[in-house]
Every structure is written in structure tokens, then in C-alpha cells.
Amino acid sequence: MAANLTNEISVQSVISDVQRGTWTPLVSDVVVSVFLLVNHVVLSSFLCVTGTVANVINLCVFLKQRLDTSMNISLFAMSVADLVGLVTLLWLNICSNPFINNLDPNIVFTEVSYLTAGWPHGCASRITSWMTVYITAERCLSIAIPLKIKEVITPSRTAGVIFGIYLANILSLVPEYSTAYFDWTHNLAKNKTTFGLAFRSNRPQTKGLTFLFHGSFTLISFFSVILFTSALILELKRTSQWRRQTTSSERQTAAMSKRDRKTMVMIVLVALSLIVCFIPTVVLSIVTISVTEFSLVGKEVNLFNTCWSFGFLLHSVNSNVHFILYYKMSSKYRLNFNELFGRKVKGKGDNQNESDTHE
């Protein structure tokens, strides 16, 4: 049995400081329990359930549309990442319940969730952000070079890019899983043997690498989304002006402009949702790397759990938004959704001339 050196040293440091009266946590046990209960157990769990249902619907609709276009393949892959992220987050919420320790006081569930839920969810969230980058870039290119887009971005190339995105993000977890594991160790804080996190002797050499990858990958994706979205908006405005000047049919011009506006609004909303919901994750990752005490086994573990509860809550919000955007902005999605779930009523919004961001 390998020794849990990092855990014991960190916990021993906390106990020593408390006994000397030289350190007081910024967030008390009572406060962190309230935030975990509200953010994880109540709000995030509810959003995880609704988001899981929504993304299962997304997968069904995209399969019905057939995965024979680059856009459908991309949206399907992003829905898979959202679904995995929501399921792992739901397990994290269960482990974060302040009352779950009553089931078995010998298991530290918050530490168990670190490897079984926390990092898998973080990986899935990164994949979602990079899929957003790819989809935004594809939409931008489809307007910039409409005649060559099908030659540049083919379904097979899209599948290859998606495979690369998944692989790179999964491999970024290797440093964490190669040095952290579960074991029965002596918990100094509880003064008994408990089942929780343990670390190998090479932990100091790899500590923080996964957080660094997580923060940098997410940050790069943010700037990429902003860049491609800005380019897309400028291109759409330029194209709309050109069409108004060259098209003689006012009805056709209005239809084109409406399609452009809907595409623009959808991309902007996807980008804003990503930025608002994921920036806290980047900030918290940077703080975790920079501040030793801000970690799951550090002195400020209560602050760590409180802050990350807000980050995870926003993740669940973002995963619910996609279904709403698809349904509101894509007539093709609505049509297939209505056919799939037995809704035969066809409203004005389902007119085939309306915008369809999945084409």
C-alpha cells in the first residue's frame, strides 16, 4: 500500500495550525454545507436531470436527421459530451450532499468524487467548449467560402477532428490519474482509517499539471470562439448588405436577411453561453495552480468546494441551453422533433423557408 504522503502532510498542517490558533478558514463548515446543499444537491441536480433528458432528445433528433453532414456530426458529438458531463456532474452532486457521509462515515465521498466525477466532468466540459469552437469556425467558413466549404469540411474530416478533440482532452487527465488513486489510509482529521484519495510519491512533480491543461485548454477555446464569432458576425453583415444591393426581389432579400440574423443570433448566444458559464472554471483552475491552500486537501478546502460548486452549477446551465437554441433557431430540428415525439401541429416557425442552422 503506497503512502498517502501529500494528504497526510496537508491535513497535519491544517490540524497543527488550528491547534496553535494561527489559522481560521475563510469559509466555515456550516457555510460550505449550505452552498453544497443549494448549488449541488438542489439546483445543479435538477438541471442535470433536465439537461440529460434534453441531450438524449438531441441525440435522437440528430440520429433521425442522419449523421451524413458535418454539422449534424458535430452537434451529435457535442450532445454526447454534454450528456457525459451531466451524468458525471449528477454523481458529483450526490457525493457533495453533506448528509451522504451518514450512509458510511468511513468513506470520504467528496474525495471519491474527485476522480470518479470531478475530472471526468471537467474533461467533458472542455470537449463541449472545443466542439463549440469547431462548429463556430465551420459556420464562419460556410459563409466566407460557400462554394468550397463542402470540399474543405467533409463529414470524414469532421469525424477526424472530433476524434482528435476527444483524444487530446482525455490524454490531458493522465498526469492526475497516474499519481492519484483510492486507498484506505489514516485520516488525521477524523483520527481513523477512511477510504479516500491517496497520492503516489511522484505527486509533487505532476501536481497542478492537469489543472494547467484544463485552464489553458478552456482559455484557448474561449478566445477561439470569440475570434470566430466576431469574424462570422462581420461576414454576415457584409453578406447581408451585398444581398440587399444585388437582389431585386424584396421578399427574397427579407428571407435571406432573416436567415442571416437567425444564424448570427444563434452563434452569438452559443458563444455567450459558453463564455459566461465557463470563465469561472478557468479562473478557479488558475487559482488552484497558484494557491497551494486552495485544493481538495488544502487548508482552504471549504472555500475550494464552495467556489467550484458555482462553477459546476454554471456547467449544468450551459448544457441545458443548447436544446433551447436548437429548437428555437432551427426549423429542421423542430420538424424532426415534432415528428419523433408525435407532435403533428406545424406552426409558422416550421416553414421550410425559415432559417435552418443545421444545413
Image (spheres, grey):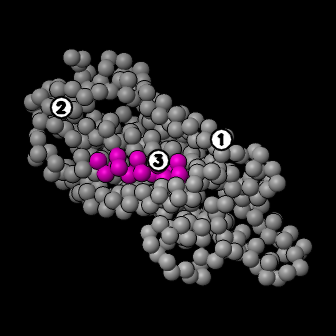
Q: Secondary structure at mark 2?
A: strand
Q: Secondary structure at mark 3?
A: helix
Residue 39 appears anywhere in the view: no
Q: Nearer the viewer, residue 247 or 270?
A: 247
The residue segment tinted magenta is: 74-91
**Front tag of 1 and 2:** 1
Disc number at residue 250? none
**Front tag of 3 and 2:** 3
Q: Quadrant of the N terminus?
A: top left
- Real-space Cα distance between discs 1 and 3? 19 Å
The residue indicated by pointer 3 is 81
Is 260 within the magenta?
no
What's the residue type where badge 1 is placed? Ser
Magenta stretch, overall SS: helix
185 left or right, relative to 87 = left
Q: Residue at x 38, y 23 (%)?
A: 178
Find residue 184 and report its image quarter: top left
Q: Residue at x 31, y 38 (%)?
A: 116
Q: Nearer the viewer, residue 55 or 94?
A: 55
**Front tag of 1 and 3:** 1
Disc number at residue 195? 2
Disc number at residue 156? 1
What's the residue type where badge 3 is placed? Ala
